Image (cartoon, grey):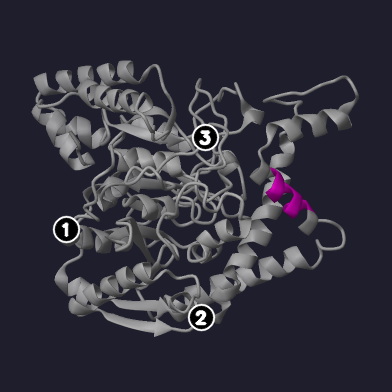
């Protein structure tokens, strides 16, 4: 049976369900799927202590019930007994962490990521590690050493990436919520493809301590849920400054998110919403996605909100600026995987240079190699003083102009992706087409603002989900989620059943 977080907590308090029941159902769903004709492949591995953690949670709940202190217990531990899905690049102490790469086969995390610590302290139960594009480099979860994750709506299609495993697990009711990571759209894009909500918070709101780096100035932890409230409660637990991450920041109203309420009709009526014309005029925008977007725009207008098309020419440079910066930082970050300190080692006794070459050639997949080579090329002597610097200059301008826009408007509204999910293998050998999947998402990462992909409809031709982005000013997560909750209460997501 599917529960939202709110419903699961109510059922646990009432005694109509136990944490053991919730975890066991997730494990059974995973096992049934794993042996099915076409497995989803959302989870790589289920943790062997998930049920014992659930039993411990049930003991706490039983004791609190006997002492009439259930409300106090759940106030201290708002996620007590609730299972969640974890992406394979977020550290869980004593558990394998591979980033879906051969080069980290067998590696065991020695400590918890800060976001994991905060969830566990709030009573949540890590179910297992989920599939992803190798080192979070991809838009379809096809670049994984464990094979692709399929879309739970239609298993002939991709789930999106790079957080496709966590997102598919939530969409298929294998977990109550999921953790992913974002560098250029890797939470919002799979959320759009799978018909669920996906939040990229303001840069720094969720600590990166214990998260394997891809592009450090862009990387963030994100949250996937079936409703805005399913995102707001975990966010309220995980947000805030972390002494281990100097880029971390407090979130105003962060703690109040655990009791998220929808925007009132009067609040929606007062909204001023900007629609960047650069995205609507994009040649790659699918007509079905455009139709869903226009329906979403019409809904806001029907509620009395002011929706205006704005001109931001700098957005045309966002995808190029993003890939220059992200791939340069990736080349630098991944240099630590050398076969010496940890992970796989291919040593033929021919010296260190050959050790590096053999280990990395065998350990990294084709997309990771491609991005390392491009990143190193950009950083090479003849380019490092111009191309990378220009990319950073464009980024700064995007950040300034987007911030200025929010002096007038409350929200930026645009599609999450130019298309709905595509079929497995369709873009695997076409890197440019794959990179353009991020066309509407990267400006958010470059400007460090929060954005939520909202399930807003489906395509006519193949009945696949379409997500629309609600993006706000820095630290406006509460506003975005409250607007989305008003949308959810009227639309109930896409209402698309998963395939079996």
For mark 1, give the secondary structure.
Answer: helix
Q: Residue drawn at (21%, 72%), measured in percent from left and top? A: 267
Using the image, tell me which numbered label, if any, was put on residue 366.
Answer: none
Q: Is residue 130 left or right of residue 237?
A: right
Distance from disc 1 to disc 3, alpha carbons, whole Å, reads 37 Å
On the image, the x and y values in percent for residue 68 come to: 9, 25
Q: Nearer the viewer, residue 447 or 281?
A: 281
Using the image, tell me which numbered label, if any, was put on residue 312.
Answer: 2
Residue 491 is drawn in which quadrant? Answer: bottom left
Q: Quadrant of the C terminus?
A: top left
On the image, the x and y values in percent for residue 423 come to: 45, 50
For mark 3, give the secondary structure.
Answer: loop
Q: Quadrant of the N terminus?
A: top left
Query: Is residue 500 depicted above or below 449 in this figure?
Result: above
Using the image, tell me which numbered label, if any, was put on residue 147.
Answer: 3
Mark 2 / mark 1, whichever is N-terminal: 2
Mark 3 / mark 2, whichever is N-terminal: 3
Distance from disc 2 to disc 1, alpha carbons, whole Å, reads 32 Å
Q: Is residue 478 visible?
A: no
Mark 1 / mark 3, whichever is N-terminal: 3
Using the image, tell me which numbered label, if any, was put on residue 489.
Answer: 1
Range of the magenta residues?
Answer: 369-376
**Label 1 crowding class (10 Å Cα cut-off): few <14, some 14-19, many 20+?**
few
């Amino acid at each position: 049976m599917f529960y939202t977080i709110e419903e699961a907590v109510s059922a646990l308090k009432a005694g109509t369900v136990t944490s053991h029941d919730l975890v066991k159902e997730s494990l059974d769903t995973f096992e049934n799927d794993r042996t099915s004709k076409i497995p989803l492949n959302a989870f790589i591995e289920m943790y062997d202590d998930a049920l014992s953690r659930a039993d411990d949670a049930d003991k706490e709940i039983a004791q609190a019930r006997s002492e009439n202190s259930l409300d106090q217990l759940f106030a201290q531990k708002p996620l007590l007994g609730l299972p969640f899905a974890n992406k394979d690049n977020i550290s869980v102490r004593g558990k394998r962490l591979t980033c879906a790469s051969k080069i980290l086969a067998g590696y065991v995390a020695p400590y918890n990521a800060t976001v994991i610590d905060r969830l566990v302290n709030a009573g949540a139960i890590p179910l297992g590690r989920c599939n992803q594009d190798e080192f979070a480099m991809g838009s379809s979860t096809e670049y994984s050493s464990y094979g692709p994750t399929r879309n739970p709506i239609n298993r002939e299609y991709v789930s999106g990436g790079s957080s496709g495993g966590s997102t598919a697990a939530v969409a298929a009711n294998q977990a109550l919520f999921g953790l992913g990571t974002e560098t250029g759209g890797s939470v919002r894009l799979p959320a759009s493809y799978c018909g669920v909500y996906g939040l990229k918070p303001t840069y720094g709101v969720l600590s990166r301590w214990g998260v394997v780096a891809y592009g450090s100035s862009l990387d963030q932890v994100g949250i996937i849920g079936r409703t805005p409230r399913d995102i707001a409660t975990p966010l309220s637990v995980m947000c805030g400054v972390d002494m281990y991450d100097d880029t971390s920041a407090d979130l105003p109203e962060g703690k109040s998110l655990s009791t998220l309420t929808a925007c009132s009709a009067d609040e929606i009526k007062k909204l001023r919403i900007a629609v960047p014309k650069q995205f609507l005029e994009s040649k790659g925008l699918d007509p079905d996605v455009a139709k869903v977007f226009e329906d979403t725009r019409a809904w806001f207008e029907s509620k009395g909100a002011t929706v205006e098309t704005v001109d931001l020419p700098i957005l045309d440079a966002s995808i190029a600026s993003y890939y220059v910066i992200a791939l340069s930082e990736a080349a630098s970050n991944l240099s630590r995987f050398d076969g010496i300190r940890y992970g796989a080692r291919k040593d033929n006794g021919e010296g260190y240079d050959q050790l590096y070459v053999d280990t990395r050639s065998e350990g990294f997949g084709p997309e990771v190699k491609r991005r390392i080579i491009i990143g190193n090329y950009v950083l090479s002597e003849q380019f490092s003083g111009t191309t990378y610097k220009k990319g950073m200059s464009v980024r700064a301008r995007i950040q300034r102009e987007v911030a200025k826009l929010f002096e007038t408007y409350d929200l930026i509204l645009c599609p999450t992706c130019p298309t709905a999910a595509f079929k497995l293998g369709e873009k695997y050998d076409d890197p440019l087409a794959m990179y353009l999947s991020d066309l509407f998402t990267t400006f958010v990462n470059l400007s460090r603002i929060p954005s939520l992909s909202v399930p807003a409809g489906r395509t006519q031709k193949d009945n696949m989900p379409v997500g629309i982005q609600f993006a706000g000013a820095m630290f406006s997560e509460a506003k975005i989620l409250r607007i989305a909750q008003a949308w959810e209460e009227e639309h109930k997501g896409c209402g698309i059943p998963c395939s079996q």
